[in-house]
Image: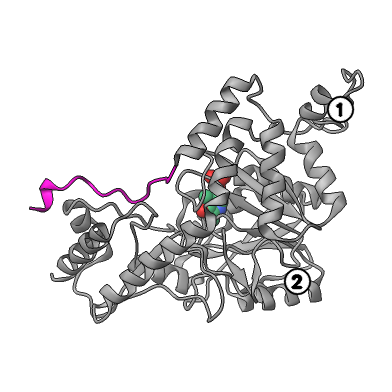
Amino acid sequence: MADKLPFLPFALPDIGDDEIAEVVDTLKSGWVTTGPKTRRFEEDFTAFLGDASLQSLAVNSATAGLHLALEALGIGPGDEVITTTHTFTATAEVVRYLGADVKLVDIDPATLCIDVKAVEAAITPRTKAVMPVHYAGLSADMVSLLALAKKHGLKVVEDAAHALPTTCGGRLIGTLDSDITVFSFYANKTITTGEGGMVVTRDVELAKRMKVMRLHGMSRDAFDRFTAKVPSWYYEIVAPGFKYNLTDIASAMGIHQLKRARAFQDRREQIARMFDEGLAGLPVVTPPRAPDGETHAWHLYVVRLGDEAAVSRDAFIERLFAAGIGCSVHYIPLHLQPYWRDRYGLKPEDFPHSQRAYERMASLPLYTRMTEADVRRVLSAVRAALDA
Ligand SMILES: *Cc1c(COP(=O)(O)O)cnc(C)c1O
């Protein structure tokens, strides 16, 4: 019976008629690269965060945004940046772009986010910054982390690729007291522009540097030049910058995706609750909930097989696939990836919590377009897969 149903993918974007109409409008407008729609998306993003002292800078990926952030903070050769081993390689690779070194640390097994005590233990005189990841959409322990960073004079760049919208202490991620926060609009994230990201900061000088470096190190961006009322062919190159601007085609999608971000979060939360209820009593550890009153973005729904589960993680995923259910693993920890392992001589026993979580974890499908029947189908496939 199951094989008659179409394959249920692990993730699907939710793109509505408004996004499509806005993209068409952009295509017909004659201005397809960074321009008025990108400016509007940036303004809307700041308004969404609800803090007019913030600047939002659109970029063509979160990876680009993280790179701009560390560059603006002056990270370079000889510096160390601490981050979690339990993340996507993008978080760490940007440190290497700048010739600095990455110090990977373990996670707190209760939240799967960076362990602040491990961060403290990893600080050396060379440490310049720390990059927490709000894993799966649950805030890292930012209260402790920001206090620790302050004590040691470290910069904080939040990898908020999963965290729109997420709160910490009732404040949205993006509005905390870190230096820079970076969101992702990759295809499977909570809102999408296909590829894209947003960099958020309150620091005027950092924003200025990132704007210049986002577009070739030009002292004025293309939109300013082409829309200025005065002759505007003149520009100055003040640094060897990058090509990290977001197109108006992408921003057209983003404007409408952002309007739906709250409704998307509601729907993701409903599905997460259905999973929690349906998995109760089974030999799986359900993902941590946000503390009362806080928002979890529910980018991912990550289960961990319990000790009593008779099936291995790999066999579990294979069985779900055979039942037509897409699954993934977030993440193969960086300490197991050849580049990071070999460069820093890392061993699994140095990261026991991440290692253990990795060996037992699987991410179930979770996206707004899933129906209740889809959720029930995933749950019955999980039950069958555990019934070894
Ligand atoms: C998706 C993701 C990124 C990279 O985002 P892009 O927009 O694809 O560059 C970085 N960090 C984490 C944790 C992610 O999940």
Assign a secondary structure to mark 1.
loop
- Tag 2 residue: 149
Quadrant of the rendering where the C terminus is positioned: bottom left
Asked if residue 5 is among those painted magenta in the image, a careful observer would answer yes
As drawn, 70 above or below 148 = above
Image location (x, y in percent) of residue 315:
21, 60
Q: Nearer the viewer, residue 333 or 113?
A: 113
As drawn, 73 above or below 227 = below
Asked if residue 368 is among those painted magenta in the image, a careful observer would answer no
Q: Quadrant of residue 221?
A: top right
User: Residue visible at 77% across and 28% down?
Assistant: 223
Q: Nearer the viewer, residue 175 or 363?
A: 175
In the picture as drawn, the residue positioned furthest to the left comes out as: 1
User: Residue visible at 56% across and 75% down?
Assistant: 294
User: Residue visible at 53% across and 68% down?
Assistant: 138
Q: Which residues are magenta?
A: 1-15
The disc at residue 237 is 1
